[in-house]
Image (cartoon, grey):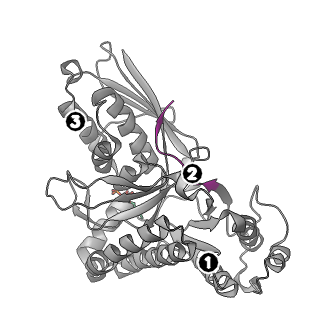
Amino acid sequence: MKEVTVTAPVNIAVIKYWGKRNVKLNLPTNSSLSVTLSQDHMCSKTTVSVDDSYDTDSLFLNDEQNEIGGRLSNVLAAFRSLTEDASLKDAKVKITSTNNFPTAAGLASSASGFAALVFALGKVFVPTYNNSQLSTIARQGSGSACRSLFGGFVAWEKGESEDGTDSSAVEVAPKSHWDDLDALICVVSANKKAVASTAGMQRTVETSPYLMHRAEQVVPQRMADITDAIKNKDFDKFADITMRDSNSFHATCLDTHPPIFYLTDVSRLIIGVVHALNEAAGRAVAAYTFDAGPNAVLYVQRKDKDLVLSIVNDLFGPCEGAQGASHSTLLHEAKIDVDLTNFKHANGLSRIIQTTIGDGPRVV
Ligand code: DP6
């Protein structure tokens, strides 16, 4: 019997992956870059065991038995063909996985879930593999999962080769490099996505003329610029690129035919608040980014966290765990002169999760 238990983090892209150039191998049209979030607040925990007594592969997600199909079968097949341990080629596995955050919170769990699974299977089947090598397998489970193999700031380089061997994740900077960056996850809706990302991006590839412009003319420069911003801990530049790329991604969704709408009125009000605040402050106080849904992730420097939290809570709350001084007092103290009352939308948010940058997967 072999058994290993691991945890893996969630990541939120600041340069978005959207579009596949090869659906089967899950190869992206453009490179992407993300920030890994702390596992204290959100992570997937997975146990993989291999035992002679198992006569079939089995999967338990949050205590419920699930079918093993599609992408998971591909991931298992990849490990069986890669292992040098002959006894493992035909061995059956039992996989048990849980999330420490409610799937109903409307936050992606496929990235941390596949990263934890691949990290655990890697320890059993190919113990000599490094995390970049494992990321090429995680990518085949879910593209964004490959970036959860590292902590801190992570690039997924799209790669050039047909077989996908160079389409892997690499660390841009560890968490310790920029440790006072925080994230506020503003949960606008916990409902399931209107259009799942895999299907949505395929529709975009088939119908959006803007997508290739974005992939070829926009993203490469942004990847280089945001890497510089991270290396120099330049929050103004980091925020500017992050917000522009979120908007560019949602523009490709609108350019898709029929269009895909992920943002809601509340999402758009959050965008308005952040720009009004940053403009009044004369610097970036917060940066927003939105994935395939209406929930905002706000990146802030720790010195501004309480201010941004109170603004969001006062305007869109009340949210659990976000009470504190009123935002007008904090704005006054910060000497930022801005009236945000026009952006108010009571009960616009169901929840705010406060978190920090985190480390990569670990054996527990
Ligand atoms: C908008 O990784 O969920 O979150 O590879 O089909 O599983 P598949 O897609 P997925 O897409 C994530 C899209 C995104 C942007 C990002 O995380 O880069």
**As shown in the figure, which amino acid type bears the numbered disc 1?**
Ala
Residue that badge 2 annotates? 104
| Residue sitting nearer the eye, 210 or 335 | 335
Provide the residue span drawn in magenta.
355-364
* Residue 150 x/y as whole percent: 43, 48
Q: Residue at x 71, y 70 (%)?
A: 308
Kindly indicate the quadrant of the structure image that contains residue 278.
bottom right
Residue that badge 3 annotates? 77
**As shown in the figure, which amino acid type bears the numbered disc 2?**
Ala
Main SS category, magenta section: loop
* Residue 94 on the magenta span: no
Horizontal side of 315 relative to 296 (left or right) equals right
Horizontal side of 21 relative to 144 (left or right) equals left
* Residue 359 on the magenta span: yes
Q: Earlier in the sequence, mark 2 or mark 3?
A: 3
Disc 1 to disc 2, C-alpha distance: 31 Å
Kindly indicate the quadrant of the structure image that contains residue 129.
top left
Q: Is residue 108 above or below residue 324?
A: above
Whether pointer 1 and pointer 3 mark residues with C-beta atoms closer than 8 Å, the reply is no
Number of the front mark, 1 or 3: 1
Whether pointer 1 and pointer 2 mark residues with C-beta atoms closer than 8 Å, the reply is no
Residue that badge 1 annotates? 284
**Mark 3 Cα within 10 Å, few/some/many (few <14, many 20+)?**
few
